[in-house]
Image (cartoon, helix red, strand yellow):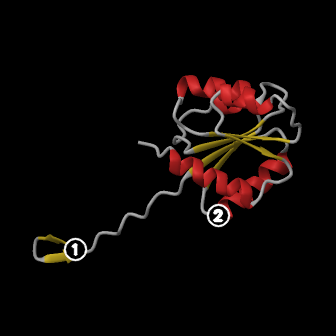
Amino acid sequence: MIEIGSHHQRLPMASPAKPTVYVVDDDAAVLGSLRFLLETDGFAVRTFRNGTALLNASGAPGADCYVIDYKMPDINGIELAGRLRQSDGETPVILITGYPDENISTRAAAAGVKDVVLKPLLDENLVKRIRRAIQDHPRA
């Protein structure tokens, strides 16, 4: 409680900000289902239909975690992760893919990707990995 003159005024308690997850996928159905899943689990979510849209976004609050699809027409998820590392080196990136290959984890790690999650297993497994990634790399 803060005293202002002879009146007492209660200031609202600041609620902790929701962690913000940026999701990039060229499949509108995947974007919609991930938005629903993550918002239901308490995240603020911003979606992008491709890597170029994310790279061109301005005026947005920073992400606490990126969830990026591997196979997209404009720029693949590993290349996008590499570009993000140049401008936002500390924010964790989780790559999602329906096209795993034997080298994807190695290439993803080299680009600074925290984790690789296989589609269609984008449920609580993904949520747990996002929470762990944010906990391991809190934003300043």
**Callout 1 amino acid:** Met
Total tally of numbered discs in the picture = 2
The image quarter containing residue 7 is bottom left
**Callout 2 amino acid:** Asp
Position of 112 with respect to 105 (left or right) is left
Q: Position of residue 135 (x, y in %)?
A: 52, 51
Position of 118 with respect to 94 (left or right) is right
Q: Report the residue at 41% width, 42% height from top.
A: 140
Q: Position of residue 1 (x, y in %)?
A: 22, 74
Q: Report the residue at 86% width, 37% height from top.
A: 100
Please rate how many residues cluster around mark 2, counting C-alpha atoms within 10 Å: few if below 14, some from 14 to 19, many from 20.
few
Circle 2 sits in a helix, a strand or a loop, which is it? loop
Q: Quick one: 14 or 78, which is closer to the camera?
A: 78
Position above or below: 59 against 124:
above
List the residue tagged with mark 1: 1
Q: Report the residue at 62% width, 33% height from top.
A: 57
Task: Please report contact status of discs 1 and 2: CB closer than 8 Å, yes or no.
Answer: no
Of the residues under marks 1 and 2, which one precedes in the sequence?
1
For marks 1 and 2, give the one nearer the viewer.
Answer: 2
Position of 133 with respect to 4 (left or right) is right
The image quarter containing residue 92 is top right
List the residue tagged with mark 2: 41
Q: Position of residue 101 (x, y in %)?
A: 87, 32
Q: Report the residue at 56% width, 22% height from top.
A: 86
Q: Position of residue 41 (x, y in %)?
A: 65, 64
Residue 75, label in figure: none
Please rate how many residues cluster around mark 1, counting C-alpha atoms within 10 Å: few if below 14, some from 14 to 19, many from 20.
few
Position above or below: 124 against 87:
below
The image quarter containing residue 43 is bottom right
C-alpha separation, residue under disc 1 versus residue under disc 2: 32 Å
Circle 1 sits in a helix, a strand or a loop, which is it? loop
